[in-house]
Image (cartoon, rainbow, N blue to C red):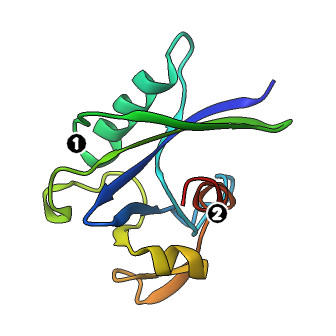
């Protein structure tokens, strides 16, 4: 049975909000940049799961979110939503992951983004690479 996940492309001044995933063995794509969001709980719609995850991960209540795409393979079903990030980065509380940044389109296309907390570049997770190619 594939895992079902909902992710958010949150945009502020042309930049995407990214989460640097923890360097924990056993999680999907540790130490890479991804989008905020996560797994659907039983009975949750993708949008409801995404809103819950955003509250849990960054302490933010999303406004308007529009559906952008679904992608399916044998292991996962990915639902992607798009919306504006209506607050400055410093008003978010990172509660999951190692870092968060607003990445420019050029950074996203390069495939690696600088982590101010770690002081190094880290690659994009495969799911984020897919979204960059599809939604751009």
Residue at screen point 13% across, 57% down:
91
Q: Residue furthest bottom?
A: 119
Is 120 displayed left or right of 15 in the figure? right
- Whole-percent x, y for residue 5 in the image: 59, 35
Element under disc 1: loop
Q: Which residue is mark 1?
A: 60
Element under disc 2: helix
- Whole-percent x, y for residue 2 in the image: 77, 29
Question: Which badge, 1 or 2, is on the more N-terminal residue?
Answer: 1
Crowd band around label 2 with a 10 angstrom C-alpha radius: few (<14), some (14–19), many (20+): some
Question: 113 or 133: nearer the eye?
Answer: 133
- Position of 118 relative to 60 (above/below): below
| Image quarter (top left, top right, bottom left or bottom right) of the C terminus | bottom right
Residue at screen point 41% across, 83% down:
118
Q: Which residue is mark 2?
A: 129
Report the Cα–Cα distance between label 1 and label 2: 24 Å
Residue at screen point 33% across, 56% down:
11
Question: 40 or 104: nearer the eye?
Answer: 104
- Position of 11 relative to 37 (above/below): below
- Position of 83 relative to 30 (above/below): above
Residue at screen point 22% across, 42% down:
60
Q: Residue furthest top?
A: 43
Is 111 displayed left or right of 58 in the figure? right
- Whole-percent x, y for residue 62 in the image: 26, 37
């Amino acid at each position: 049975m594939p895992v079902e996940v909902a992710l958010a492309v949150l945009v502020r001044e042309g930049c995407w909000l990214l989460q640097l995933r923890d360097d924990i063995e056993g999680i999907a794509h540790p130490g890479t940049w991804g989008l905020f969001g996560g797994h659907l709980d039983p009975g949750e719609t993708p949008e409801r799961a995404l809103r819950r995850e955003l509250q849990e991960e960054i302490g933010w209540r999303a406004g308007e979110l529009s559906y952008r795409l679904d992608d399916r393979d044998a292991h996962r079903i990915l639902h992607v939503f798009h919306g504006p990030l209506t607050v400055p980065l410093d008003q978010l509380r990172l509660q999951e992951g190692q870092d968060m940044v607003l990445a420019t389109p050029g950074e996203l296309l390069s495939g690696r983004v600088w982590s101010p907390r770690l002081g190094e570049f880290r690659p994009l997770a495969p799911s984020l690479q897919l979204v960059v190619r599809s939604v751009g």
